[in-house]
Amino acid sequence: MNGPDRPFRRTVIFAELLLVPCGARAAGDPNRSLLASLLAGQIMGNGCLPPDLGLGEEVFRHLLDEYFPGYPLVSTQRPGEDIPEWSDLQKLLLDHRARQSPSELLLANIVATACGGRDHLWQDLGLLNRDELSRLMWANFPALASANSGDMKWKKFLYRQFCSREGIYVCPAPSCGECKEYAKCFGPEN
């Protein structure tokens, strides 16, 4: 679906997901709306995530059963991209998680998977905008979010953090060289 109805349709899907009755634990999870946004983007064919969001079929099915039981999810089939540093990015995120919700574990895997995409991280995740990604980072990985004091683009920032842990000092994200905003990201930091 293209055209002016596309944003409206995404909003409808997001609202429908949040209206699905779920268990008390999922209803009280502050990440439920972020997960709904990820799924709404997935249903609309946005982002680069594979159909299981990079969680594996069993964990993905558990996420749906726990947070959005019975919702008829139909997503665009696309292969996920394997990135060699996936486990390192996942570990970086897990090492800095807030430890407030079990869904932080899911989001660490999803964000690490989306880092293999070719656009900005919020776009690769299928989120509505960059503010939504910032909210995700502050809620789930607050130490990393506070370390991003220069408001660096999130994928660039995560790769810089990962590379500095590994002692690598020249480290653009794998898709940065192809991005139309390369000069903006790799110019002087604010």
Image: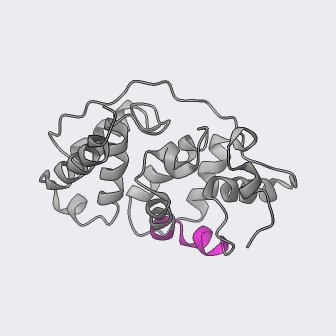
User: Could you say where residue 171 lies in the image, as x and y percent from the top left?
Assistant: 81, 50
Question: Is residue 147 shown above or below 43?
Answer: below
Q: In which quarter of the image is the C terminus?
A: bottom right
Looking at the rendering, which quadrant does residue 30 occupy? bottom left
Q: In which quarter of the image is the N terminus?
A: top left
Q: Which residue is painted at 44% across and 58% down in the image?
A: 104
Question: Is residue 26 shown above or below 6?
Answer: below
User: Could you say where residue 129 lies in the image, as x and y percent from the top left?
Assistant: 45, 56
Looking at the rendering, which quadrant does residue 132 occupy? bottom left
User: Could you say where residue 35 lies in the image, as x and y percent from the top left?
Assistant: 34, 52
Please tell me how many numbered marks the rendered image carries.
Answer: 0
Q: Which residue is painted at 71% across and 38% down in the image?
A: 178
Q: Is 167 one of the magenta-colored residues?
A: no
Q: Is 139 one of the magenta-colored residues?
A: yes
Find the magenta span and give its range.
138-148
The secondary structure making up most of the magenta span is helix
Q: Which residue is painted at 24% across and 67% down in the image?
A: 28
Q: Left or right: 30 with respect to 22?
A: right
Q: Left or right: 178 with respect to 86?
A: right
